[in-house]
Image: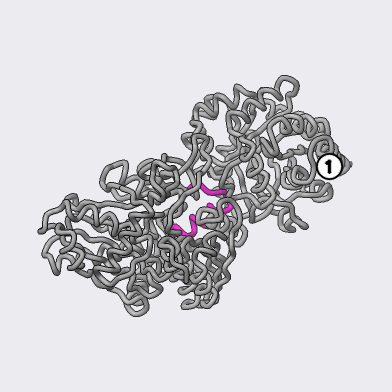
Amino acid sequence: MNRLIQRFETLKQQNSKALVTFITAGDPDLATTETMIHVLEEAGADVIELGMPFSDPMADGPTIQLSSERALAAGTTLSRTLDTVRSVRRSSSIPIILMGYLNPIHAYGYERFCRDAVDAGVDGVLLVDMPPEESTQFLEFATTHELQVIFLLTPTSNAARIATVARLGRGFVYYVTVTGVTGARQEVSSSIEAELLRVRDSISIPVVAGFGISTPEQAASVAALADGVVVGSAIVKLFQQYTGKELEREAGNFVKSLKQALSSQLT
Amino acid sequence: MKLPDKKGHFGDFGGRYVPETLMPALLELEQAYAHYRNDREFKEEFNYYLRQYVGRPNPLYFAEKLTARLGGARIYLKREDLNHTGAHKVNNTIGQGLLAKRMGKKRVIAETGAGMHGVATATIAALFGMSCEVFMGEEDTRRQSQNVFRMRLLGATVTPVTAGTATLKDAMNEAMRNWVTTIADTFYVIGTVAGPHPYPMMVRDFQSVIGKEVKRQHKAVEGKLPDCLIACVGGGSNALGLFYPFLKDKDVRMVGVEAAGHGIETGKHAAPLCAGSPGILHGNRTYLLQDQHGQITHAHSISAGLDYPGVGPEHSWLKDTERAEYVSITDDEALEGFKALALEEGIIPALESSHAIAHVLKLAPTMAKDQSIVVCLSGRGDKDMHTVAEAMGVNF
């Protein structure tokens, strides 16, 4: 069974919430990425979301924009990112999903990507600028190769769009908690509770919420409403401030604090 | 078959490749436009502003001296440079502005390269009483500081964009990011026939007033259709505005002129149709400047308005179906076109339009004297004085 689906089943049995952590592949280099995936896993991450850097990240705020620039400057490519995943797989079975924009995959070739990604040990993919309407061709190849395609829903998605994602989405649904771009925020929207209820009512696969979650407190309060949370920019910011052992320690501690907040939220 | 199809595709091109947050807004816009494009009152109001405010129809001017100098086809200039605000951009912003007003939006945003679309958007925002924010690459705010000042005089906020290459594509990224955040009350006025569906179709429709007038005006003086249409192509809105009403007239040759910058072979150009490959950027599938890994590469052109690594998807379709042909003109050739029109006709063209003129200099002499060329003079050159002076080594 797919590692991603397996993980969500296990979490459900344990009555716990998924902690999905995002880092950009190749920021500041792919060797660091490989180390940091292990660090995040040891600190309690349930799923690794690996950003595929793109020159024009139109749905991302400054933190991930800069992170993508650092990764591209270091020569990160899609095939080298897949090599990194392959290498991680020698010693880890943590679910890994790739997140990014469609053009680098278009250039790589949809079918080749789906085949190579699964072969390298990738479990799922989330393409920010591929809404269900434009996904037909890609979904065919993804289905053939059993790559889980994750779609986004947002506060602006109406019932018809939620139904479409319920039909096409695999692995989990990524619910964007804000009407905006990625990036840490002071507060999480107050209407999110009703919105998440609405989405979870119509969708059978897990719903994970993200965008703007930057503290253990926010993570805990959002996790109470969903099957898990994604923390991205708040972790990526640490890559801007620290390197080497310091980065490992800071990111490790931060993820531990997130995990603790999610666990204590259960009691 | 009428293009685009229902989902905004021109063959394999176009579409709606955007984050989920934007999808509902695009669907709302599509519905509103589908309604108003056939609404008599809307069309009357659009035509009213084009006539009374923009000053349409503008002339189809016979460039007699230039024709004589080149000794070939008769050359006509479609004088979009005489529009209010000095370029064709206003045709589109009037249309989108009226649509925004009917949709109850209080705020408009826009991206701009040379600043002409920014000025045209700031203009209609003032006219229709909406607030306006224009995103402009920091590099372009320096190259086109006068247009920045014009926009501010018109009451707009100009936000310089420092991300990426700090040019038009980055301004478009930033406008998209802002739109994602402000979608409830904001209308995004895209300035060219690119972006996600329905923009390429909608902007084309608003700009096709250019070609419709040309058809009528040319018939009145020459008694027939033109033999050839020429226009510069950045995103491609003035070209498509000119071409579109002639698409079914198979005998009319259409030539789009891209910016070859320092020369195609140097890699420093802005010619995705001539030297790029298909990919996905800014919501649509189209020809792009990109590396083998699908990363968007830097565009280069002396004219800020052509300095864009993509192109409208309908042009990609016209290229692949060979209905239109696409050529490129270097910075140096464009400057020759610029000077030729100034000296022969007393008209100072925008650097963008100078690319089209430069191709006329090559093509007209190869055509017969009883043939005609219509070239779209998409804008006036006042905004380019600094750039041209610098290129000629003149210091103010």
Amino acid at circle 1: Phe
Secondary element at tag 1:
helix
Q: Quadrant of the N terminus of chain A?
A: top right
Residue B65: x and y in percent read 19, 67
Quadrant of the rendered structure where residue B246 is? Answer: bottom left
Q: Residue furthest bottom?
A: B52
Residue corresponding to mark 1: A254
Near mark 1 (Cα within 10 A), the count class, few <14, some 14-19 or many ≥20, is: many
A150 left or right, relative to B234: right
Seen in the picture, residue B318 relative to A106 is either above or below; the reply is below
Q: Quadrant of the C terminus of chain A?
A: top right
Comparing B41 with B133, the one in front is B133
Residue B23: x and y in percent read 53, 52
Number of numbered callouts drawn: 1
Q: Which residues lie in the magenta part?
A: B16-30
What subunit carries mark 1?
Answer: A
A186 left or right, relative to A60: right
Magenta span contains residue B21: yes
Residue B217 visible in the picture: no
Comparing B334 with B4, the one in front is B334
Residue B342 visible in the picture: yes
Residue at horizontal 57 percent and vertical 40 percent from the top:
A127
Residue A220: x and y in percent read 82, 46
Quadrant of the rendered structure where residue B319 is? Answer: top left
Magenta span contains residue B107: no
B214 left or right, relative to B80: left
Residue at horizontal 51 percent and vertical 44 percent from the top:
B296
What is the chief secondary structure element of the magenta stretch? helix
Image colouring: one colour
Residue B39: x and y in percent read 36, 68
Residue at horizontal 34 percent and vertical 66 percent from the top:
B349
